[in-house]
Image (cartoon, coloured by chain):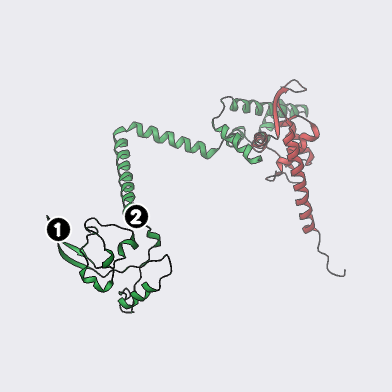
Chain colours: A red, B green
Amino acid sequence: MEKRDVKQGTLTLMILRTLEGLGPLHGYGIARRIEETSNQRLVLNYGTLYPALLKLEQEGCIKPEWRQSENNRRAKYYSLTAVGRKRLAEETREWRETAELLAAFLTPWRTEGS
Amino acid sequence: MRSLRGWLARAAGVLSRPGADDDLRAELESHLEFAIAENVRRGMAPDAARRQALLEAGGLDQAVEAVRDQRGLPWLETFAADVRYAVRALARHPVVASVTILSLAAGIGSATAMLIVRDAVFVNPPPLYRAPGQLSRVDVGRPERPRGSVPIDLYERWAATLPTGASIAGASGGGTLDVKTDDREAILPVRSVTSEFFTVLGVDTELGRTFAADETDSRKRRDQPGTLVEPV
């Protein structure tokens, strides 16, 4: 399967959901997790990931903190805030609705009486 | 709310904290090290592991640039840089700058002053009459002369059937006359008016007097006193 860039607007949800599932995580961890979850179909380069992280930080959804990683490297860990949890719930609902809507359009047309 | 908070954070980012770039560099370095370590763990040689990690990063400098854009408000920073450049350029040529600034100031100032005067004289003149908004001018027109005068009989009928509170006055079309006062003589524009004229307009005379009670019959108009309202 071809690798593709993350679609505009979906990265926020992916980051928040990853932090909710795995707890505080550094940028590398978040990127790896998103790539794994997408079954390696998505690639996340720095220029996409870090502006998105900063934006979430500016909006108060995540909180950064420098600390020691398990293999003794210093890394900046991001954790979900209360604002972030609320945002995640909102985004999840919105994307579910969008996905359902699109699914309804993408199901094969059934002709009358068949 | 979400965007307001983000916007405020970005506006604050314009006054870029000095450590912000270093912090970002350190963060990207640590990301890179994680990636290299992972590649090595998968069995790559250290050099190849680093190369591969850099390839996947998609350019560190571009990332720093993209984060900087998100940190501040690029257009505000560009504008500030333009202003600084302009100030420096003006400071380098003080004579040219001061001539330019002074002529702009003079131009804008005189145009403003002219428009203020025009406004006062033509658009909002000081009130000449007591209640200009309640005054109406009535003409009786014909197709070939749309602003003709009101026949005196019609005027008198109107005057006799006015609703309470309303008043009416008439004035003729005017000409010029040699006017003599005690110490001077001049040709002045004149017009004959009915006795209610001054009360309807709410103006008083500059010289002389208005009509007395026994002079109000319009049929005795010829005996009315000369009255100077205002030399025009």
Q: Residue B72: give x, y in percent of width and height.
A: 57, 35
Q: Chain of mark 2?
A: B
Left or right relative to B165: residue B108 = left
Nearest the viewer among B199 and B8 is B199
Q: Amino acid at mark 2?
A: Pro
Nearest the viewer among B88 and B38 is B88
Q: Residue B49: give x, y in percent of width and height.
A: 71, 29
Residue A74 can be seen in this image: no
Residue B218 can be seen in this image: yes
The secondary structure type at the circle numbered 2 is: loop
Measuring 40% from the left and 66% from the top, which residue is drawn there?
A: B166
Residue B181's tag is 1
Instruction: Characterize the local packing of mark 2: few (<14), some (14-19) or many (20 or more) Cα atoms within 10 angstroms.
Output: few
Q: Which residue is mark 2?
A: B127
Q: Amino acid at mark 1?
A: Thr
Left or right relative to B66: residue B112 = left
The span from disc 2 to disc 1 (Cα, nearest Å) is: 28 Å
